Image (cartoon, helix red, strand yellow):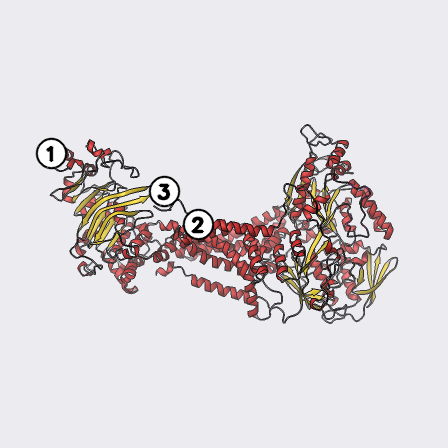
Amino acid sequence: MSARARWRPGRVVAALAFAASALVMALPSAAAADPVVLRVGTTQDLDASNPFNTVLVSGFEAFQLTYSLLVEFDKDAHPAPGFADSWERAADRVTFHIRTGMQWSDGEPADSADACFSWGLALAAIEDASYVGVGYLDPNVKDAGVTRIECPDASTVVAYTTDQSDRILQVYVPILPEHIYGKDDYTAIAEEKFDAPLVGTGPYTLAEWKTGQYARFVRNPQYWGPQGYEDEIVLRFYSNPDAMVQALKSGEIDYARDVNADQFEQLRADPRFTGVVGKANGFTQLAFNTYGSGTGETIEGGGPSTLALLDPAFRDALGYAIDKKVLLYRVLGGYGDAGTTIVPPVLSDWHVEPTTPRTFDIALAGQKLDAAGYPLDGSGKRLDKQGKVISLRLVTTSTSADYAKAAAFVKSWYGQLGIGVSVAVMDSSALGTLLLPSAGAKYDLELWDWMGNPDPNSLLQVLRCDAIENTSDSQYCNDAYDSLYDLQLTQTGEERHDTLAQMQNLIYDEAPYDILYYDASLHAYRTNRFAGWQNMPASSTPLFSYGILQYTLLTNAADAPIPPVAPATDDATQPAVPDLPDAGGAVSGRPVALLAMVAAVVLGAGVLLARRPRPAGADDDG
Amino acid sequence: MTTEVRGRLGRLLPDGADPTAPLLEVRDLAVRFRTPSGASVRAVGGMSFRLDAGEAMGIAGESGCGKTTTALSLVHLLPGTGRVSAGSVKLFGIDLVPLTERQLARYRWREISMVFQGAMNALNPVQRVGDQIAEPIEVRLGQSRDASRKRAGELLELVGIPRQRASAYPHELSGGMRQRAMIAMALACDPAVVIGDEPTTALDVMVQAQILQLLERLRRELGLSLLLITHDLSVIAETCDRVMVMYAGRVAEEGPVSRVFTAPRHPYTVKLLSSFPDIRTGRRALSMIPGSPPDLRTPPPGCLFAPRCEHAMPVCAVETPPEINSDDGVRVACHLFTAGDAVRRDAASEVKA
Amino acid sequence: MNVAYLVRKLAQALVTIAAIVILLFVLFRAMPGSPDRVSKNPNMTPAMQAAERARWGLDKPLVPDQLVAFIGSTVTGDLGTSIKFRGQPVTEVVGAAVGPTILLVGLGEAIAIIVGLALGALSGWRRGGLVDRLGNGASLVFYSMPYFVIGMPLIMVFASGLGWFPTSGMTTPGASADPVGQVLDVAGHLVLPLTAVTLGLIGAYSILMRSAIIETRAEDYITTARAKGLTDARILRHHAFPNALLPMVTFIAINLGYVIAGAITLEVVFSWPGLGTLTVAALNARDYPLLQGIFLLVSVSVVMFNLLADFVYGALDPRVRS
């Protein structure tokens, strides 16, 4: 009877082992024998295989592999044949010619009806101001000025546009198979899960998606373009960036997207890997809360803490207190570019440098503040025109440690001008909500980033008056700027370039934004399995850039007689930057190696501590 | 109640036993504890006594005087830092003090078993009573599971518990029943000596009487040798042949119950007895003796009772009193009774008054 | 233990779960932030944002509309659609993550309970002995170490360094078609995270068990057992351990109840596709339906294991039974 109270670990183990093996057995089976697989690692988990529902770069990469765009991107990110193999522009329309004999991966014919169906979904959603496309697909169409689409015959698609821009050639509307989704309107499509395997016209179609683990794509034998070397592509998702780099080192993956600067340096020093610095189409900005500028409106209990923020002279003066070079090297490890205007240099057709640039000079910044009517008080604190001590609330997000680092520098520089800065770090959803005037917009400075579309419009529109209560994080409103924005929409070529130059200078001079730096995306890949790596375009990265052309251009590294030439951007060696100041909160170093060392020390100390003889008589009982 | 119990005479003695030696003879036993500060405290010092077969001896004294320590030290059950620092404990002439744990295991329960105070805590709360009684029979005597369960049932009946109650858990039994079960457990291996450590203290008066009657009967029927530790003199008066009064880890007085209780010699014994107005009926906790026992970490020189003693003399503060054996079998450790000193004998007669 | 008692206990459990779930519903929404403000999307127009909010039902007042809708659908077993994983039912998203979490954390708990209790018992029984000094020292160290600190060195040494195990994840995509190959593949991926979780948990169990044993060792019935001349091993197994186990039951039950919540840091470090990783993703996305689904599951599990603890306690401790 004493067995009742007896401990029977044996049975527990057996039961658990059984349960575990049952669980394992229940896992679905994977594919067969030894295909050539390109394995790509990213820290961004795929959110949806439905192109109308994804908001992530990994999602765009996934749907572009499966579904062709009407017009794709070539290796320089210029328009290239896609679902349509040619097109011509007339004043009010673009006529696309669909190649004949094209087939979906299931063997069904693919023709203009599929294109009209897919574009029709987007146009209907725009008309209803719907959420479909969650802000990424439809605005492309709208921004391109598309009003109507027609399919006069199986090989022709005609799109009518309000302007003559070429933005219609950069529209991310995936062409879906009408024979599968044709019965659905856009609201039904938005609720579709798009379960793998998917039917597409792209080079590889989604065959399997395990949430949080990987998405597997298989070769589409019906693909209209030249077949790629690899049979399969696997996107692996990592919740831990350090583990992703370890996986690249161990050979579990061939390509790693977005590694941090420390890891990147290690990988570049290793001949087995090539590191790529991809210029991002975006920037990190310090935004000033200028709510009420122009309108004089205020928010009850919210808004900026001082009217100084509404004064361009104040913001201009502060611009001299930011050392962009220090930020670039101390925060980004030198990978990226110092920030100036609101159109990133990667959009080389449109970017201009400011006509009257500011240089880092704290003393000059102080003089300018004095001159603009913001003197220091007796205790060295800066006063606004109402005689109140200026103390600014900086808000930023925890999505990357870089933001907090940059904020620490801003705090230290502004501090030298007698302006106190308090930093609050929160997650992106909390920050996104805080910025809304309806939620109080209780902040003075915001440090965050923007990523743009192939066309600069998306980055330009966040400073429009009508972006307030929506995308605006500076609450900036300037009718002159809005007029210029509307004007450039109707322009092309040189004309548009001049207007955009004017807008960039206007924002630089008025300074609702201080663009701190243009971010870079650090990727790395192994060179022992695949050759033919190329940055697309040259300033960017091979994968996760514009289009999916790279996936079909890889070759077997064993067949490449000469070792692959390092891409041009890889020689972006860092010049030594002497004597950069360090902000109090800014940390650098190699966290993983450091942690491993800490672990070893703690372990050793723990064992020593445990072995330390206890004082006599310290026994528990006696 | 007429269950057959294997007689004491037929039991196997341990190897090396001397049949002519006294059953249990303790000589100059000293027990020391280490304090948390590292000092060594002598809890029991120079204890000597003897227990013969079939005899019942009571050990009396205030709490903390070393009664339980003495009992536990016999088979090395002292907790934590306690250890026997000197002396010998001879059972059948075999000295148990130098034995290792492994060697000593042979003597535990099979030769010396115990009945603890408050059987609620002394019994394993999650094991059935019958299993706890059967455990030493099975493990120590190597009997089969069934045989040991059967024997446990017999023992339960022997102490007046129906054998069906073997499947009960300790908390399902009344206090008296638990104590009976504990006694049955102590008898499981038919030991040479049973030590009762305050076996009746936690019980109410009626139950106490029943338990004492049970012990009395078992002693009679089984010829038990009993070492009964209690601060309750009436229990000793009722059950024991001899009594040993301890004070601060030493023997104050020892002798036949009839002598000691009617004519106490040691001033401490006198005080102790006077706190029990009527030994036959009074079962009260010891009433106050002025002062308190000495701090054994810093024992005073001389007689340890001297600071509380009305009859203290200069010599008491200097010299430890020797134990004086008198012809009537009483042993006393008091300077009042140092041999051949008439003056002191007179003083002693005053003590009696 | 009669039927009425059982019914009462179950009813209590249900009320508890309902209260927790409603409380969490309100708490999640009280957090600053909103699912439509998660990603910085320069293309978003106010009209689209409004449409998006309407799609998730966020345009209606929290109380009573949203709450009533939530209670109504939850009662009918409809946990809604995930916001982050757009178009996927919450039950599906959560369902896919449950298996991996139970496999990793459940197995880790099982091993840790057995090894940890044994180690703690031995440490406490021979306090200051070799097992105690080494075992308890290591336990304290691992117990106080975050999973990241345990996990990363494991990855660096045994995965990318020696190449014995995969660095992270649960399966190799398309690695093997036959079931045996798949089991081996998962087993290979399991080794490092399982080691990490087990090390961490052993510490917790061993430290608690150690103190329980030390406390038990001072009990009178242990002296009785010693007086009985039983061997040390037998006293530990039959007298000290079953009693020291009693205070552990509740702790074990609570821990097992939380198995379903996964080990968040651990899963993130090893990119393990379990509920821990999912919780982080759902929290960052303010994916209210997904969060609610996960925490409903966790609440049910925790409450049920507590209920189970009551019963197991009763089975182990006769004093509770009567």
3D distance between C-alphas at marks 2 and 1: 65 Å
Quadrant for the N terminus of chain A in the image:
bottom left
The extreme top residue here reads: A378
Identify the subunit bearing mark 1: B
Q: Nearer the viewer, residue C200 or A2?
A: C200
The amino acid at mark 3 is: Pro
Mark 3 or 2, closer to the camera: 2
Which amino acid type corresponds to the residue marked 1 in the rendered image? Ala
**Subunit ID for the residue under disc 2:** A
Amino acid carrying mark 2 in the image = Arg
Q: Position of residue C236 (x, y in %)?
A: 36, 56
Mark 2 and mark 1 in contact? Answer it, CB < 8 Å.
Answer: no
- SS state under label 3: loop
- N-terminal-most mark, 3 or 1: 3
Which residue in the structure is indicated by mark 1? B342
Q: Main secondary structure of the magenta part?
A: loop
Does A333 appear above or below A71? above
Could you say whether the residue bearing mark 2 is in a helix, strand or loop? Answer: helix
Residue at x-position 80% and y-position 66%: A112
Q: Position of residue A188 (x, y in %)?
A: 70, 60
Horizontal arrangement in the rendering, residue B302 relative to residue C273 (left or right)? left
Residue B36: give its label.
3
Image mark for residue A252: none
Residue indicated by mark 2? A611
* Magenta stretch, residue numbers: A342-360
Give the quarter of the figure containing the C terminus of chain A. top left
- Residues at marks 3 and 2, CA–CA distance in whole angstroms: 20 Å
Toward the viewer: C318 or A91?
Answer: A91
